[in-house]
Image: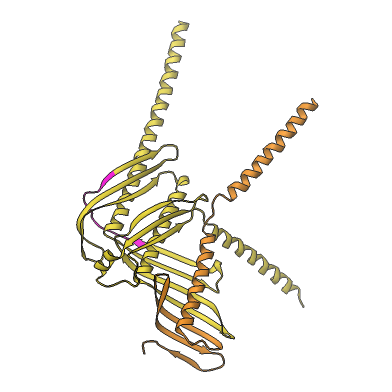
Chain colours: A orange, B yellow
Amino acid sequence: MRKNGNTMKRKKIITSMILFVLCVVMGNVFAGNKEMVEKRVKELDKLNKEAVNSLIDIPKEGRIKIKAKVHPYDHKIQFDLLEKEIILKNKANKGEKADE
Amino acid sequence: MNSLKKNGQWFACICTCLIVFISVHAYAGNKRIMTIRAAKVLAERALVETIYGLKLRAVEKVEDMVATSFKGTTESKTKAVVNGIRFEEVVYDPEQDIAKVMASVQVDKIVNIDGMEIDLGNKVFRRVAFATSTPQNAGALKALRAAELDAYKQLMKRIVGFELESHTSVENYILKSDIVKTKVLATLCLAEVTEYGWTDEGDAYVKMQVNIADIEDVLGQKILGNEKVIEVMGEGAQEDTFSQATKLQDKESNAQLKKTQVTGDKRP
């Protein structure tokens, strides 16, 4: 009787261990799109900073609005400025259009 | 009398088994045909996208560089009549109810999506497509289509460029991206799939390429850069872990908001 009780306990432990391992493995089976989105967000941030740096004389403080055409080629990027608006902190609006 | 009764019972039992067996197989046959037909239609669409071309509109927007605010949409459209499509390879997996079809077509000349006549010199184009009639098994195939659209989008961005719109704040000469938005609306043809598959994690990838000389002929203008071939790799996921994470974050922030409201109410 005691032996039977022990084997039952062992079986229960083994079954719960297998179930736990399965749950952990199944949870990690799909990588999903979260990583892809996070990577894309970083790429967009990098692209924007590169565009602003190459197209605008950056003020010490303020806000910059731009609209540009982006042409990636040979691991480089060409930016063509379409519109820009620079709002300096505590100063008047300095908005202007690139093609004007 | 008894043996006759027994024989009758046996006969009825065998008949029932036969009916069940036949009906099950008849259903399986219909499912197989439907799945293969769907794969054939998708292979035809893939060929049309390659030869005639497709129109694609993609927008990506992120605010304050917070991944949860990211929104990305891609829409594609194509419509054409292509004659002479042949199905070279049709494979059906009855266990997973997935069909794979390879379609090919030989084309001499075609008027593409932009209304331009292209001389293809009897080139043979091949595209592969998968389909299933079982929604539970569609995840991997949807991921593959998402990867395909991502690859088309990357090629278009590389060939015709894209629009960037942004709001950036500056503090002590340090840039902080507030809103970044990219837009691409273009047509593309003659894109060929060179490789596709799934990673160990189940995400799909599609490698696609275009010959620059062919594209320059179609566009009638030179494309920036010295590359002869542009190759990109599109990615697609089976599981929307991003939305799940966003929902979880929303729930947590709502709970926090409620907590602060409750504590705020208690204040004199």
Q: Is residue A70 above or below residue B212?
A: below
Q: Which residue lies furthest to the bottom in this view?
A: A92
Q: How many marks?
A: 0
Q: Please provide percent x and percent y for residue B104.
A: 27, 49
Locate the N terminus of chain B by quadrant.
top left
Q: Please provide percent x and percent y for residue B237.
A: 48, 55
* Front-lying residue, A51 or B186: A51
The magenta region covers: B76-87
Query: Which image quadrant is residue B21 in?
Result: top left
* Front-lying residue, B35 or A24: A24
Q: Residue at x 42, y 59 (%)?
A: B233
Q: Residue at x 36, y 37 (%)?
A: B30
Instruction: From the viewer's perspective, tell me whether residue B237 is left or right of residue B81.
Output: right
Query: Which image quadrant is residue A18 in?
Result: top right
Q: Residue at x 26, y 59 (%)?
A: B52
Q: Please provide percent x and percent y for residue B47.
A: 29, 54
Locate the C terminus of chain B by quadrant.
bottom right
Q: Please provide percent x and percent y for residue B182.
A: 43, 72
Q: Residue furthest right?
A: A2
Q: Is residue A6 above or below residue B53?
A: above
> Does the magenta-highlighted stretch encompass residue B126?
no
Q: Residue at x 45, y 83 (%)?
A: A55
* Front-lying residue, B253 or B56: B56
Q: Residue furthest top?
A: B1
Q: Is residue B70 above or below residue A92?
A: above
> Does the magenta-highlighted stretch encompass residue B83?
yes
Q: Is the magenta stretch mostly helix, strand or loop?
A: loop
